[in-house]
Image (tube, helix red, strand yellow):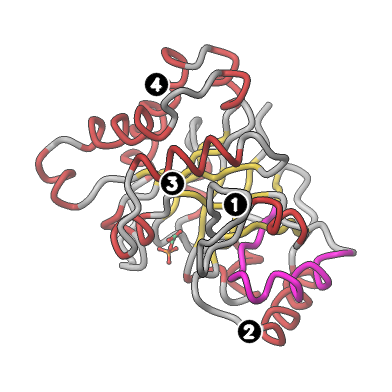
Amino acid sequence: MRRYLIAGNWKMHMTGPDTRTLIRELDQSIGRNPRVDVLVCPPFTALAAAREATASTAIGLGAQNVHWEDKGAFTGEVSCDMLLDCGCTHVIIGHSERRQLFSEDDSTVNRKLTKVLTTELIPILCVGETLQQREDGTTEKAILDQLEAGLKGLTPQETSRMIVAYEPVWAIGTGRTATPAIAQEVHAAVRDWFDRIQGSEVAANIRILYGGSVNPGNVSGLMAEPDIDGALVGGASLKAESFSQLCSF
Ligand code: PGA
């Protein structure tokens, strides 16, 4: 039985003091929902504060990006070991903002994913179609191409540890959420792809999150769909009130 995961992607928000306050408020307001795991992904600079603040809570800690090399002359980058050293258990890979604004492509995503899967970190691989692709009727192809290229060379033994986040680009930060039916259709296609390429066991167990303008008003409809196992939340994860409501959908 898959457990839900509600993950907050804080993006470029929150200083150390802001982080301590938000996590304290979250800890006080998040009910203990036994079906739900909760994760926050602060910016790198707030990870130390977040580690301290989450220490005696049930809130997990993730990062928003990682480099595939262990160390070296890569100004501005951080390695898997550095994230583990900060207490991270998860890391987001291939978010559409990284793909669109920082020129990440499927091959860099593949390098990151391959590296992360050699460590204890759990990758959350983001895939999603643009508005153009949806209007052209090529959504499924776009998503499956990203999976194909992103997971190139990886075996079921490796991919059984990963999480996928389906985030339609047109729904991120726009207030336009995919309807539960639209999201479910893509989630089912993703699970079916895993079934064909990585085997039935990986497909049955892999958690597939939905992301894109998830809020307290639409979360329960989305989570009621059979192949939606949680949410990756941007804007609504920055306030304790909305994020805690999301976690107890
Ligand atoms: P949003 O962001 O919830 O603000 O749309 C989601 C994401 O980018 O992960």
Q: Which residues are magenta?
A: 38-55
How many neighbours does mark 4 have within 10 angstroms: few (below 14), some (14-19), or many (20 or more)? some
Q: Quadrant of residue 101?
A: bottom left
Front residue of 108/165: it is: 108
Q: Amino acid at mark 2?
A: Thr
Pick whichever of labels 4 and 1 is earlier in the sequence: 1
| Contact between labelled residues 1 and 3, with CB atoms less than 8 Å apart | no
Pick whichever of labels 3 and 1 is earlier in the sequence: 1
What whole-number distance in Å separates the C-alpha atoms at marks 3 and 4?
15 Å
What whole-number distance in Å separates the C-alpha atoms at marks 3 and 2?
25 Å
What whole-number distance in Å separates the C-alpha atoms at marks 4 and 1?
22 Å
Q: Quadrant of the image for the C terminus?
A: bottom right
Which residue lies at the image location 43% right of the left edge and 37% below the top edge? 110
Q: Is residue 137 above or below residue 213?
A: above
Side of 238 relative to 98 (left or right): right
Which residue lies at the image location 43% right of the left edge and 15% below the top edge? 197
Which residue is the extreme one toward the bottom? Answer: 17
Side of 14 relative to 148 (left or right): right
How many neighbours does mark 2 have within 10 angstroms: few (below 14), some (14-19), or many (20 or more)? some
Residue holding disc 4: 193
Q: Any mark on residue 126, and which?
A: 3
What whole-number distance in Å separates the C-alpha atoms at marks 4 and 2?
39 Å
Residue holding disc 2: 15
Which residue is the extreme one toward the left? Answer: 136
Q: Secondary structure at mark 4?
A: helix
Ligand 1 within 8 angstroms of badge 2 C-beta: no
